[in-house]
Image: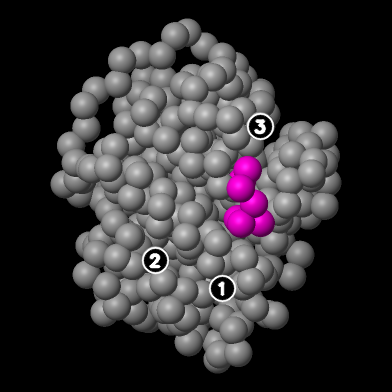
Amino acid sequence: MLRATAALVFLAAAVALPALDSAPARTLYGFFPSPPELTNESVIATFKAIGQHADTVLLARNVPWGDFVGGVDGSSADIEQLTTMVSLARTNGLEPVFVIDPLNGLDRRRFMNLPAGWTPSFAEPRVRAAMTNYTMRIVRDFHPRFLALASEINTWQDTHPEDFPSFLSLYRGLYDMVKAAAPSTKVFVTFQWDELNNLVPGVDGGKARFATRWEQVEAFEPRLDLWAISTYPYVALGSAAEIPADYFARLLARTGKPLAIAEGGFSSENIGTLRGSPEGQLQFLQAIHRQIGARLALWVYTVLSDFSLNSYAPSLRQQGLGEEVSTLAWFAHIGLRASDGTPKPALAAWDSFRGR
């Protein structure tokens, strides 16, 4: 949902990365590193605060298409920034989780920053080459334990069904390449759970509400090392009380693989017609913990702290993403803390689930 920002200061050289076990012994809790304000100080403070409430930080990266269409090597401002972010993560005791995202995180009907003249399709040879090369550069340079090769990919399938076979073939080839180079890396894609359960008008696949479209997930088998979902039920439901008792638990009966919440949240305030509250936010966390907590390899709550829309909006407009500002507003109050760091009731529950 939220991406790391250009306001991140480039700090000292990267610290050495310690070796990682091949599998977690317990659920790893994490957040995106999205700060309350787009300032260097806020970014640094956010990494420090995440280190006090989590084990991981999720680094979601759009593909820098032009840098990698010609090969794996070469200079890239994106790789320099990512190196700095990995260093910040390690300095604060956090393990990076990587998500490579070719799509616009606030409008998944579109590619993100595709160069002029490129066809917006996963059949486009330059798209396939750049995404492949960028993936293998991240594997080579950062040796990730967890690597997602797309975010909420069922949203692309729902709006571009004709192009989905091209993405699937790209993913299958990439999965095999990553596993050949780094057998212990957990490779997967993420799925938008609320849409997968037909709670988003206009993209219900002709099925009833809560009728899970398992075929969209299982199309990736056996090349899924874990089943990872995103979920924001306050966008699709009237309140947290409407979350069914088996809404997440149905995953347990469908797969024996580890599960992950790759991103998700619940607003603590009303946003237009969307209903949120501190109590609903707490109920949301409790529903996940109660229904699937024991099977989660990863649980990433999208942001630790609320953020200032006034701070983010100019940056989006400069990137030509002015239409997405209204969508971003939906997520401004999903943090487990207010923007000044004041904890909300759900933060204590989060820390207790983590055992801290």
- Mark 3 lies on a secondary structure that is helix
In what quadrant of the picture does the C terminus appear? Answer: top left
Q: Is residue 174 left or right of residue 120?
A: left
Q: Which residue is most to the top?
A: 12
| Residue that appears at 60% across and 34% down | 69
Check disc 3 and give the amino acid type: Gly
Sequence-wise, the earlier of marks 2 and 1 is 1
- Residue 152 in picture, x, y percent from top left: 53, 60
Is residue 38 depicted above or below 267 in this figure? above
**Residue situated in front as seen by the camera: 270 or 75:** 75
- Residue 29 in picture, x, y percent from top left: 34, 46
- Mark 1 lies on a secondary structure that is helix
Q: Which residues are magenta?
A: 121-127
Is residue 75 depicted above or below 244 in this figure? above
**Residue situated in front as seen by the camera: 46 or 202:** 202
- Residue 299 in picture, x, y percent from top left: 36, 52
- Mark 2 lies on a secondary structure that is loop
Is residue 207 depicted above or below 331 in this figure? below
Check disc 1 and give the amino acid type: Glu
The mark found on residue 66 in the picture is 3
Sequence-wise, the earlier of marks 2 and 3 is 3
Sequence-wise, the earlier of marks 1 and 3 is 3
Check disc 2 and give the amino acid type: Phe
Give the distance between the C-alpha atoms of the residues marked 1 and 3, in whole angstroms: 32 Å
Label 2 Cα neighbours within 10 Å, binned few <14 / some 14-19 / many ≥20: some
